[in-house]
């Protein structure tokens, strides 16, 4: 099983920690972090890529093999997690003889193992175990503290960060487990690939003729025998009880997964923890756990729960997810712009990116549900294929967007750890005083991106003006020469020329 290799790598990191505590950190630690991690990571990436390419679809019917799933979606997320884990282990500035470094790297690998188990989970048990393993390992990774600080102060700050993280994620675990219990009680299955059919049966039973007839009997104004009223009440309760369990259960599952993914207002102290975390702790909590939560959201709410009644209002989750995603994008984007520390900036930007990913997930589920609704249970070729093709495109956009952000954030954290270990974004303000030409160039680029025309005196740039005209700006032809008057930059003639063209 490909997952076994990553689990072995994670356990090997823990063993390296134990060996370091026993007084033999050099040989075993160097073997664990220098040879086993790259070899195991590359072997796992190759195995998952080959297994995932054999799957016919990226999203849709789950390709289950026992308790794990083999498909392209899992292969993509596995490759992303492997890249992030290897980059974090390589970029960690602490020496291998440091016990805190061995602890942080071992817990990071264990968090990656849990995340990969959650990505490939085919039932509720594997899914919950993988998420809890990644979350707990991330909290223990935070306890290693931040690099570049004294050991005592870093240990105290690390324990405080781990406590804050575990308390917030404990709330998410309670919501998730309660929701899973309600969904299992309503559907009677723990297999994700059986969930869609069971949920359809739940709502079909609720809308069956006998249940509605019992409700009509109970709402009748005439006096009825007590035995008939009791029988009608029992029939109505038996018909609507599974739906009454499923609807709040699905919303609780969504809330628990959003706490793990980190969506505003369900951050649960995530940004405060990110500001005090070390490199391995930040990667474990902000990238590894978040990637696992995003994969589970796609696995549950797109691949399984995509029927129209489950997605659309008033009983569906699509409206609530879209509202939370929009709020998270706006609020977290503003907070990211105002952040002065790189770790906090990337944490807020990650929450905003998860909002965009959640919008793409909601769009994918809506496309699949719309195809099933318009088809009326029959696979009409054009509409059915259009809906599923659009859903595939939305999921692909979500995965690519999340992957690009994760790799960019990892690169930024690695660069900050190696070059500017104890510096924040406020220290970059001195670049304006040291290099006025650079500041002026950046200001011109920023104004150009905002849609402003360049000031008089700029050289000709026919390619830039043509590109700008294609993006609905008012730059026509070529930029004027410096000797032309500034009156030619007035908005009226330029817009008129654009309109005539």
Image (cartoon, rainbow, N blue to C red):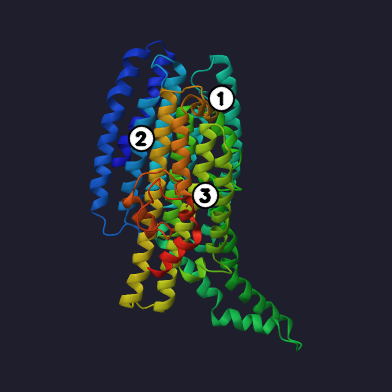
Q: Mark 3 points at which residue?
A: 257
Query: Residue visible at 35% across and 75% down?
Result: 383
Q: How would you rate the neighbour count of disc 3 (Cα within 10 Å): few for under 14, some for 14-19, many for 20 or more? A: many
Query: Residue visible at 57% across and 38% down?
Result: 270
Query: Residue visible at 39% across and 55% down?
Result: 468
Q: Which residue occupies the foreground of this view, 86 or 36? A: 86
Query: Residue visible at 36% across and 53% down?
Result: 465
Tally of numbered tags: 3
- First in sequence, mark 1 or 2: give its number: 2
Task: Say above or below: 384 vs 305.
Answer: below
Is residue 181 at all visible to an observer of this figure? no
- Which label lies toward us, 3 or 2? 3
Residue 473 image point, x, y percent: 44, 58
Task: Say above or below: 398 vs 270.
Answer: below
User: How far apart are labels 1 and 2 at the CA level?
Assistant: 25 Å
Task: Say above or below: 313 vs 46.
Answer: below
User: How far apart are labels 3 and 2 at the CA level?
Assistant: 23 Å
Q: How would you rate the neighbour count of disc 2 (Cα within 10 Å): few for under 14, some for 14-19, many for 20 or more? A: many
Task: Say above or below: 427 vs 482.
Answer: above
């Amino acid at each position: 099983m490909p997952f076994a290799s990553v689990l072995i790598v994670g356990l090997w990191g823990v063993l390296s920690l134990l060996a370091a505590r026993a007084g033999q950190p050099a040989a075993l630690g160097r073997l664990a972090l220098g040879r086993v991690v790259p070899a195991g990571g590359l072997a796992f990436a190759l195995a998952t890529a080959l297994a995932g390419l054999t799957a016919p679809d990226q999203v849709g019917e789950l390709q289950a093999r026992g308790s794990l799933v083999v498909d392209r979606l899992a292969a993509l997320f596995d490759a992303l997690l492997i890249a992030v884990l290897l980059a974090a282990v390589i970029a960690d500035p602490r020496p291998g003889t440091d016990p805190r470094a061995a602890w942080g790297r071992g817990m990071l690998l264990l968090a990656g193992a849990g995340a990969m188990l959650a990505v490939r989970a085919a039932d509720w048990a594997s899914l919950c175990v993988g998420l809890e393993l990644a979350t707990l390992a991330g909290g223990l990774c935070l306890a290693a503290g931040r690099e570049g600080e004294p050991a005592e102060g870093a240990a105290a700050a690390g324990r405080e960060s781990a406590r804050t993280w575990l308390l917030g994620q404990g709330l998410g675990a309670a919501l998730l487990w309660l929701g899973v219990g309600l969904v299992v009680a309503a559907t009677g299955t723990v297999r994700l690939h059986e969930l869609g059919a069971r949920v359809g049966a739940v709502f079909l039973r609720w809308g069956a003729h006998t249940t509605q007839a019992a409700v009509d009997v109970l709402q009748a104004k005439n006096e009825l025998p007590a035995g008939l009223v009791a029988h009608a009440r029992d029939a109505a309760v038996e018909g609507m009880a599974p739906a009454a369990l499923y609807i709040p259960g699905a919303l609780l599952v969504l809330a628990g997964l959003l706490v793990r993914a980190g969506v505003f207002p369900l951050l649960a102290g995530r940004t405060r923890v990110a500001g005090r975390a070390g490199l391995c702790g930040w990667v474990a909590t902000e990238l590894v756990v978040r990637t696992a939560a995003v994969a589970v959201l796609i696995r549950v709410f797109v691949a399984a729960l995509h029927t129209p009644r489950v997605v659309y209002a008033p009983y569906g989750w699509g409206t609530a997810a879209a509202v939370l995603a929009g709020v998270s994008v706006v609020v977290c984007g503003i907070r990211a712009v105002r952040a002065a520390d790189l770790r906090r900036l990337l944490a807020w930007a990650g929450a905003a990116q998860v909002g965009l990913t959640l919008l793409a997930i909601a769009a994918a589920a809506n496309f699949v549900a719309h195809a099933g609704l318009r088809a009326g249970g029959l696979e009409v070729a054009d509409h059915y294929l259009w809906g599923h093709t659009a859903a595939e495109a939305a999921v692909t956009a979500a995965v690519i967007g999340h992957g690009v952000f994760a790799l960019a954030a990892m690169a930024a954290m690695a660069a900050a750890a190696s070059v500017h270990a104890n510096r924040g974004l406020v220290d970059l303000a001195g670049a304006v005083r040291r290099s006025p030409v650079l500041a002026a160039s950046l200001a011109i680029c920023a104004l150009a991106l905002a849609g402003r025309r360049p000031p008089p005196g700029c050289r000709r740039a026919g390619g830039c003006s043509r590109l700008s005209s294609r993006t609905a700006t008012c730059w026509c032809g070529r930029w004027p020469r410096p000797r032309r008057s500034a009156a030619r930059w007035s908005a009226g003639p330029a817009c008129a020329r654009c309109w005539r063209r």
